Each structure stands twice: as structure tokens, then as C-alpha cells.
Amino acid sequence: MKKKIAFICVHNSCRSQIAEALGKHLAGKRYEFYSAGTQTKPQINPDAVRLLKNLYGIDMEETQYSKTFDQIPTPDIAISMGCDVGCPFIGRAFDDNWGLPDPTGQGDEVFLEVIEQIKARILAL
């Protein structure tokens, strides 16, 4: 059985969604990937959607949506994307905190740097 890895942010609209999409794309044969937050947003960050579609052909809006932690299976590994906006409480300790800055509202170069950091960390799992 594949281990379940969950990427957690407060709003589940940007970094955690990118990580879920890249995880499924790059390592979906080895792990099951999920993302969630303690709150939700009405949509995934449009810049993240656009860039992942352009870079990898992944359409996050087709396969993902903003959801809370109680809407995903209990993960074997829970990774916080970064607590610069306050770490969400998920009822257990995180296995890792990737400490990534939130690129929301910033230019493509900031998004691309965060996407590359997420990609590298997923490939290192």
C-alpha cells in the first residue's frame, strides 16, 4: 500500500495545491498525494494554475479543489508548506515544515522559484 502524503497550508489555495499536483505528476506511482488547509478559498490561485498548466500540462482546476484537513484520508506523512502565515492545527505534529514563502500576489519569478523548490523536495522524498 502506498504511503499517503498531505501538504498543508492555511487556505489550501496555492503552495499546498502546487505540491499535490506536482507530487501526483512526479511521484504518483510511489505515493498518494493530498493537500488541505484549515480554511478554504473559492478557487485555486490562478497564477499557480496557469504556471503549472504551462510548465507541466497539469490542469489543477480539473482534478483539485480547496479543501479542509478533515476532507482527506489520514496521512502517513503531513508536511507544512511554511508557517509564515501561521501554522494550521491538524490535531498532530507535522512530520516536516518546508518553510516556503507564499508567492500569492507576487510576480511569476517568485512563483517559479517556489514551484522549483517544491519539485526538488518531492523528488527527494
Image (cartoon, rainbow, N blue to C red):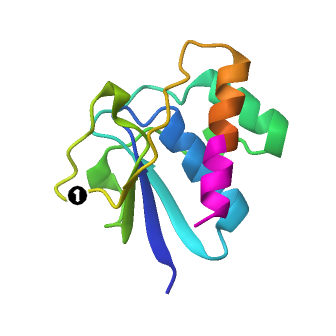
Q: Main secondary structure of the magenta part?
A: helix
Question: Relative to the observer, which residue lies in front, 5 or 83?
Answer: 83
Q: Return the x and y of residue 116 as percentages of the image width and height.
A: 70, 41
Residue range of the region highlighted in magenta in the rendering: 117-125
Q: Residue furthest bottom?
A: 1
Q: Give the class, few, some or many, for how many residues have Cα within 10 Å of label 1's Cα (few <14, many ≥20).
A: few
Q: Is residue 83 rendered magenta in the image? A: no
24 is higher (above) or lower (below) than 8: below
Left-right relation of 103 to 54:
left
Asked whether, in this view, residue 30 is left or right of residue 77, the answer is right
On-image quarter of the C terminus: bottom right
- Measuring 53% from the left and 42% from the top, which residue is drawn there? 17
The answer to whether residue 94 is above or below residue 112 is below
Q: Where residue 55 appears, x then y in whole percent?
A: 82, 38
Residue drawn where x is 66% and y is 38% of the image: 115
Q: Name the residue furthest left.
A: 91
Residue 24: name its quadrant: bottom right
Q: Position of residue 73 (x, y in %)?
A: 35, 65
Compared to 76, does 64 lie above or below?
above
Q: Quadrant of residue 112?
A: top right
> Which amino acid, by three-letter code, is at mark 1?
Ala
Residue depicted at x 64% and y 30%: 48
Question: Quadrant location of residue 105?
Answer: top right
Q: Determine which residue is flagged by label 1.
A: 93
